[in-house]
Image (spheres, coloured by chain):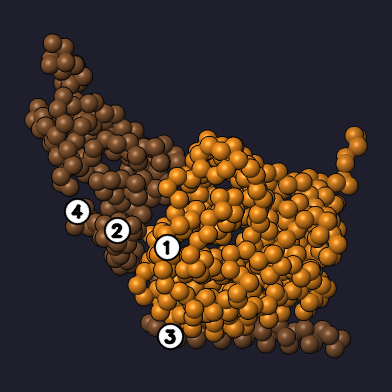
Chain colours: A brown, B orange
């Protein structure tokens, strides 16, 4: 009988202790509120630039973006991707560093590297991407990056890129080549033939 | 009239059941409400981690280790890189070691907070869960600040870490610890000392020390049974031998030694010890370059290695066989949650169905790691 009443006492007592804590938080709701009304308010994104060169790499994991004019087609990002969501096709240009205006190919990157390849296909399947950031580190021209953060001047943050169709999540970065243009690029140089 | 079998009933729990902590199916044989046998059915979350690792390079395995124990990805990374560095005989700088310990311990706190909060949720207490997730969120914010990701970090690399700590990380972390330590007392008042919670967990699901050892149970589940075994203390890896911390073991605080409450209580005490380690690590964090020891190409010599580390769930081991190429010949992961689940049948015999939920929650399993 004694046990019965001590049990009731302890239950009520410990429940009261717990309820007091929740009540205290309810009274200080302004101070203790941590909920954010998401579409109206957003967390500030952390801003940092840190990496191998301590300037250009970012630590934001959001949508991948490629500055295709800077891409030299070295395939490093394609090889390092653990889920193979990057596909790159390249065609060798006749002369290194030459502008080919009919396919919108610029000969030099913004870093001054002369390009030897026309990137005819650069697709990233963002529905397969595992956001490991491994493709960003080896890029010699720093043209593939996650948008936002320190890169927000190049491309603003975009972490709400859901789509209704899975096909829309496959991003095409290279300029489309017609079969004629492809054939023309792939044909051997006349000087070599002669 | 035919014979109706009334002595045994098969009850399916899961795979879509909130108390199974993932996609686990339990086939429970019951006699009335008393459980006579439990058959766990695994494999709903199988993603071929080990087979997949044989087709990708060594650095590409790290994002996959993240996805095994997704509640403590830093510790999964930690185990893998420690094993790889031992195999390749890489000596990383002191700063890298300290950063790894800081990240590992922060992730241990985050993982334990979720384990305790969800355990309260299983038992029927909703408020502590929200309070603990609120504080876990602050740890995840720190991770995001450091490496950009909140859950699957790919932060630790073979020979270093991907990014150095941000400028004022130490200040933020100490600020968090100062805020966090009084919160532990609040959790205790909310949940631990609650009479209803004690009644549900004390004396329930006792794992005696010999049973725990024979099933290979490790981590807080083993220490809850009163066995003093912590890989950080007994087989120190990385720089854990430089820190002062205690290994909390269960003592039968409100019931028998090795019951559900002890396993819960050991986790709560471990959070305090992690805070202690964090304070020491932040105090003498050296400066240096975190990319100094990164190898140009990860191509370990022929051979094999097994190393274990202490993840929040217990003994996390990696067995790696290298054939001298950049692709591993075999990566085997010894998962602590898998062995913890194996003793469920033995432990929950004779308990009620509602106690099975309490026992399963106290084992703190993560299905991503069990199925791999």
Q: Nearer the viewer, residue A94 or B210?
A: A94
Estimate the spatial distance between the alpha carbons at disc 1 and disc 3, rounded to whole Å. Answer: 43 Å
Badge 2 crowding class, 10 Å Cα cut-off, few under 14, some 14 to 19, many 20 or more, is: few
Residues at marks 4 and 1 on the same chain: no
Q: Foreground mark, 2 or 4?
A: 2
Mark drawn on residue A53: 2
Give the residue at x 39% y 37%. A79
Residue B176's spot in the image, x, y percent?
Answer: 46, 78
Q: Secondary structure at mark 3?
A: loop
Mark drawn on residue A28: 3
Evaluate whether residue B364 shows in this view: no
Mark drawn on residue B290: 1
Residue B19's spot in the image, x, y percent?
Answer: 64, 57
Describe residue A48's horizontal placement relative to residue B104 as left or right.
left
Mark drawn on residue A154: 4
Describe residue A53's horizontal placement relative to residue B129 as left or right.
left
Residue B90's spot in the image, x, y percent?
Answer: 53, 55
Describe residue B69's horizontal placement relative to residue B352 as left or right.
left
Work out whether mark 4 precedes mark 3 in sequence or the reverse, and give the earlier one. Answer: 3
Q: Secondary structure at mark 2?
A: loop
């Amino acid at each position: 009988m004694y046990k019965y009443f001590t049990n009731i006492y302890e239950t009520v007592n410990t429940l009261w202790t717990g309820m007091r804590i929740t009540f205290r938080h309810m009274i200080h709701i302004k101070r203790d509120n941590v909920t954010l009304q998401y579409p109206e308010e957003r967390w500030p994104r952390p801003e940092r630039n840190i990496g191998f060169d301590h300037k250009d790499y970012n630590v934001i994991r959001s949508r991948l973006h490629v500055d295709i004019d800077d891409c030299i087609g070295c395939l490093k990002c394609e090889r390092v991707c653990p889920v193979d969501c990057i596909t790159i096709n390249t065609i060798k240009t006749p002369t290194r560093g030459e502008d080919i205006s009919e396919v919108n190919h610029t000969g030099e990157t913004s870093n001054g590297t002369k390009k030897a390849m026309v990137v005819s296909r650069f697709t990233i399947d963002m529905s397969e991407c595992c956001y490991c950031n491994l493709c960003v580190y080896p890029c010699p021209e720093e043209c593939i990056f996650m948008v936002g953060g320190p890169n927000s001047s190049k491309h603003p943050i975009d972490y709400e890129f859901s789509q209704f169709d899975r096909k829309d999540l496959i991003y095409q970065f290279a300029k489309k080549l017609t079969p004629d243009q492809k054939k023309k690029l792939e044909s051997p140089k006349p000087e070599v033939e002669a | 009239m035919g014979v109706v079998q009334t002595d045994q009933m098969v009850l399916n729990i899961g795979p879509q059941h909130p108390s199974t902590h993932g996609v686990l199916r339990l086939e429970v044989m019951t006699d009335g409400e008393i459980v006579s046998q439990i058959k766990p059915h695994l494999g709903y979350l199988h993603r071929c981690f080990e087979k997949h690792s044989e087709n990708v390079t060594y650095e590409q395995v790290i994002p996959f280790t993240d996805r095994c124990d997704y509640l403590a990805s830093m510790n999964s990374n930690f185990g893998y890189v420690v094993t790889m560095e031992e195999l390749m005989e890489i000596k990383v700088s002191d700063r890298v070691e300290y950063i790894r310990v800081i990240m590992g311990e922060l992730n241990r706190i985050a993982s334990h907070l979720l384990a305790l909060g969800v355990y309260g949720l299983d038992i029927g207490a909703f408020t502590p869960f929200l309070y603990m997730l609120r504080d876990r969120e602050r740890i995840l914010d720190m991770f995001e600040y450091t490496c950009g990701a909140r859950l699957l970090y790919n932060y630790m690399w073979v020979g270093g870490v991907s990014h150095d700590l941000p400028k004022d990380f130490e200040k933020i972390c100490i600020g968090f610890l100062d805020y966090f330590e009084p919160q532990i007392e609040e959790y205790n008042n909310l949940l631990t000392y609650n009479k209803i919670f004690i009644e549900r967990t004390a004396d329930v699901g006792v794992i005696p020390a010999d049973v725990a050892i024979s099933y290979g149970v490790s981590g807080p589940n083993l220490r809850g049974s009163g066995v003093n075994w912590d890989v950080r203390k007994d087989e120190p890896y990385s720089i854990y031998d430089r820190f002062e911390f205690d290994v909390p073991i269960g003592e039968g605080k409100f019931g028998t030694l090795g019951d559900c409450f002890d396993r819960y209580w050991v986790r709560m005490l471990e959070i305090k010890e992690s805070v202690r380690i964090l304070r020491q690590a932040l105090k003498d964090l050296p400066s240096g370059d975190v990319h100094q020891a990164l190898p140009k190409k990860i191509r370990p010599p022929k051979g094999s290695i097994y190393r274990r580390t202490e993840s929040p769930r217990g003994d996390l081991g990696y067995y790696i066989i290298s054939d001298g190429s950049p692709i591993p010949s075999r990566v085997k992961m010894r998962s602590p949650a898998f062995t913890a689940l194996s003793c469920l049948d033995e432990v929950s015999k004779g308990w009620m169905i509602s106690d099975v939920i309490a026992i399963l929650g106290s084992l703190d399993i993560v299905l991503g790691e069990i199925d791999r």
